[in-house]
Image: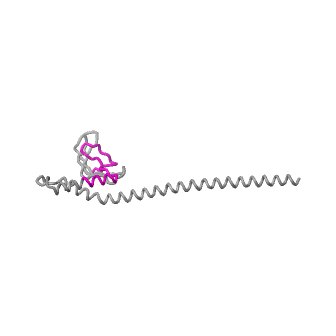
Amino acid sequence: MVRKKQDDGEKSQALDWETVAQELTADLQRTRADFENYRKRVEQEKQNARMTGEASAVLKLLPVIDNIERAITHIPTEIADDKWVQGVVGLAKNLDKSLDALHLKRIVATPGTVFDPALHDAIQFDDNAEGDQEVIAEELQAGYMLAGQPIRHAMVRVTRQ
C-alpha cells in the first residue's frame, strides 16, 4: 500500500513538471513572437523617420530646383551658346541625376495628360471648354514624387477634352 501511494505521488509530480514545462514553452513562444513584432515595428518606425527626413530635405530644395529650371527656360537666345550658360545647364542635368538617385521623380503634367487629383492641384479651370475628360492644359509648377509618394503636387491649369 505504501508503494502505491509513492507511485501516485511520483506520477502527480511528473504531471506537474510536464505542465510547468508546457506553460514555460508557451510563454517563451509568446515572448519570441512579441519581440519579433517589436523588432519589425521599430524597423518600420526607423524607415518612416528616414523617409520623413528625406522628404523634408527635398522639400527645402524644390524652390531652388524651380528657380534653376525657370532660369534655364528663360535664357536669352543671344547668350544660349555661352560656355557659362552651358555650364549652368550641365549643372541642372547633374542635379537631376542626383535627385534621381534619391528616388525623386517629377510628376508628369504635360498638356493633354489626364488630370489626377492624387497627383495634380487644379489652380485654374477653363470653364468654357467642352468635353468628357478633364486634362491638363498647362503645368504652372512642377510636382514631385519621392519613393513613389507625392511630396508636392503639380500645380496645373485644367481644361476639358
Q: How many marks?
A: 0
Looking at the image, which residue is at 29% across and 59% down?
A: 61
User: At which x and y percent is residue 141?
Assistant: 25, 53
User: At which x and y percent is residue 140?
Assistant: 24, 52
Q: Is residue 137 left or right of residue 45?
A: left
Looking at the image, which residue is at 64% across and 53% down?
A: 26
Residue found at the very far left of the displayed protein: 78
Residue found at the very far top of the displayed protein: 132
Q: Is residue 111 left or right of residue 51?
A: left
Residue found at the very far right of the displayed protein: 1
| Residues rendered magenta in the picture | 93-122
Q: How is the image coloured?
A: one colour
Looking at the image, which residue is at 79% across and 54% down?
A: 10
User: At which x and y percent is residue 56?
Assistant: 35, 59
Placement of the C terminus among the 4 image quadrants: top left
Q: Is residue 118 one of those drawn in magenta? A: yes
Q: Is residue 18 one of those drawn in magenta? A: no
Q: Is residue 22 left or right of residue 12?
A: left
User: At which x and y percent is residue 134?
Assistant: 28, 43
Looking at the image, which residue is at 72% across and 55% down?
A: 17
